[in-house]
Amino acid sequence: MTASIVISTYNWKEALELTLLSAARQTVLPKEVIIADDGSRSDTRELIDRMRPAMPFPLIHVWQEDKGFRRALAMNQAFARLTADIVINIDGDIIMERHFVEDHLRYARPGYYLSGSRSKLTQRLNDRFFAARDYNLHWYSPGLRRRMNALRLPWLTPLFIVLLKDYDHGRGCNMSFWLKDLLAVNGYDGDMIGYGNEDTDLMARISAMGVKKRFVKFSCIQYHIHHKEVPSKSDKASWRHNINLQESNEANRVIRVKNGIDRFLAAGD
């Protein structure tokens, strides 16, 4: 099996730099890394172009014009470029522990998708890593929050997969799917504009197709870079719109959305 990483980003090149460094340090390298850029300024492209020659994998930058929070569309455009078996979704404010890709591949099974958790950096750690343009992290790092989520104990993961099989949990910054399952539901619902519920809707539609979730406690470890607010491009009205759209999809038993990956496949993007 092969795995690709898709990273969503918007105007935070300092965080994205650390995310890309962590991708390059994986024990099992991704087949490719695709950055789903929701309209960042030119300095993000400059960072990617600077880092690309040092990356031990193809680094692809997919960009769309900034017209508000349109992460679902950006991700679908990135999905249209994928070539691996497994798709790992993360955000551009995530540092991956070095076994992250290895663990997602280890626990991948046909008929399942994976969901993991995250620990969190404090502002002090942020400042230190941004100044150094590098990082050094362990579960015992001073200042780390949600430290239990930074513990990698892979021998316990299979037990917790069973114990937490009905755990209603899912984070868009730490999920992996089979590409064939993403294509079957046509990816994210591109009609979801604005922050909120695009991930829960995707998981609900994949689950309705019969694909089950495996919660991988003590594996697939990641660290969330500290920030105080949700993206400034979001608002409560769009969040309510997305909730209503998800409820409509569920009520009408929609599995494959109309505005999804295939619009970008058809366009040749």
Image (spheres, rainbow, N blue to C red):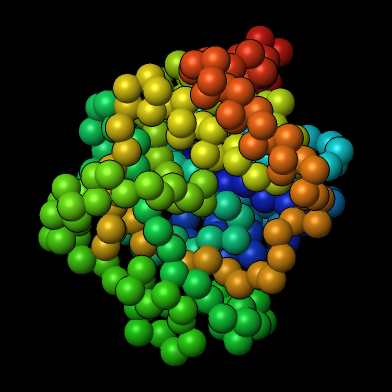
Which part of the image, by quadrant, shows the N terminus?
A: top left
Residue at 73% x, 35% y: name it: 241
Taking the image as drawn, is residue 185 in sight? Answer: yes
Question: In this rendering, is residue 32 above or below 190?
Answer: below
Taking the image as drawn, is residue 37 in sight? Answer: no
Residue 74 appears at what percent x and percent y? 68, 35
Residue 135 appears at what percent x and percent y? 51, 76
Question: In this rendering, is residue 232 above or below 62?
Answer: below
Residue 24 appears at what percent x and percent y? 46, 56
Residue 21 appears at what percent x and percent y? 52, 62
- Say which of 208 and 186 sits in front: 208
- Say which of 109 and 171 sits in front: 171
Q: Seen in the image, is 180 located left or right of residue 121?
A: left
Residue at 40% x, 40% y: name it: 176
Residue that sits furthest to the bottom in the current view: 142
Q: Seen in the image, is 129 located left or right of residue 24?
A: right
In terms of image quadrants, where is residue 50? bottom right
Residue that sits furthest to the top in the current view: 266
Question: In this rendering, is residue 172 above or below 264?
Answer: below
- The number of discs equals 0
Residue at 45% x, 16% y: name it: 184
Q: Seen in the image, is 254 located left or right of residue 26?
A: right
Which part of the image, by quadrant, shows the C terminus?
A: top right
In terms of image quadrants, where is residue 263? top right
In terms of image quadrants, where is residue 245? top right
Q: Seen in the image, is 57 located left or right of residue 244?
A: left
Residue at 27% x, 38% y: name it: 108
